[in-house]
């Protein structure tokens, strides 16, 4: 098996916030799995999403495109996608494409959760 295709997604939640934990390589081959999960959450009116990237080793433009595809509709429904615990090389890809302007990128899951709590 080709090592680069290793990809897993785990779902959990903290109060009313969904946590999507990504593991491995998010690319054109694996992006549809993430797309489906986000679509399922939205169909269940779950719009508060944190993506845990602690174990994400690689992201391609196809992976980035998944977030772009849904962010507007999620925000229109009062939610958001927060990104947490990016490895430096993954962050670099986001940074190059201007993602820190569009998405909140936080060092920890806890800090991402606090972003959703009303002040």
Image (spheres, rainbow, N blue to C red):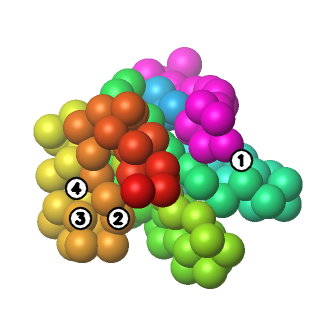
First in sequence: mark 2 or mark 4?
Answer: 4
- Disc nearest the viewer among 3 and 1: 3
Residue, disc 3: 100
- Disc nearest the viewer among 2 and 4: 2
Query: With respect to residue 18, does 75 lie above or below?
Result: below
Nearest the eye: 24 or 73: 73
Residue 32 visible, this angle: no
Q: Which mark is residue 93?
A: 4
First in sequence: mark 3 or mark 1?
Answer: 1
SS of the residue under disc 3:
helix
Q: CA distance from mark 4 to mark 3?
A: 10 Å
Residue, disc 1: 37
Overall secondary structure of the magenta stretch?
Answer: strand
SS of the residue under disc 1:
helix
- Disc nearest the viewer among 1 and 2: 2
Residue, disc 2: 103
Q: CA distance from mark 2 to mark 4?
A: 13 Å
First in sequence: mark 1 or mark 2?
Answer: 1
The range drawn in magenta is 1-20
- Disc nearest the viewer among 1 and 4: 1
Residue found at x 35% / y 64%: 103
40 with respect to 106 (left or right): right
43 with respect to 27 (left or right): right
Q: CA distance from mark 1 to mark 2?
A: 19 Å
How many other residues sit within 10 Å of disc 4, few (<14), some (14-19) or many (≥20)?
some
On-image quarter of the N terminus: top right
2 and 3 marks in contact (CB < 8 Å): yes
Residue found at x 57% / y 37%: 19
């Amino acid at each position: 098996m080709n090592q680069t295709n290793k990809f897993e997604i785990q779902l959990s939640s903290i109060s009313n916030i969904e946590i999507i934990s990504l593991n491995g390589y998010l690319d054109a081959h694996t992006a549809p799995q993430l797309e489906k999960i986000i679509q399922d959450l939205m169909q269940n009116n779950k719009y508060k999403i944190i993506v845990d990237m602690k174990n994400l080793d690689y992201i391609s433009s196809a992976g980035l495109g998944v977030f772009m595809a849904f962010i507007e509709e999620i925000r229109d429904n009062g939610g958001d996608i927060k990104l947490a615990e990016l490895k430096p090389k993954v962050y670099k890809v986001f940074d190059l494409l201007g993602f820190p302007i569009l998405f909140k990128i936080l060092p920890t899951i806890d800090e991402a959760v606090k972003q959703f709590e009303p002040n």
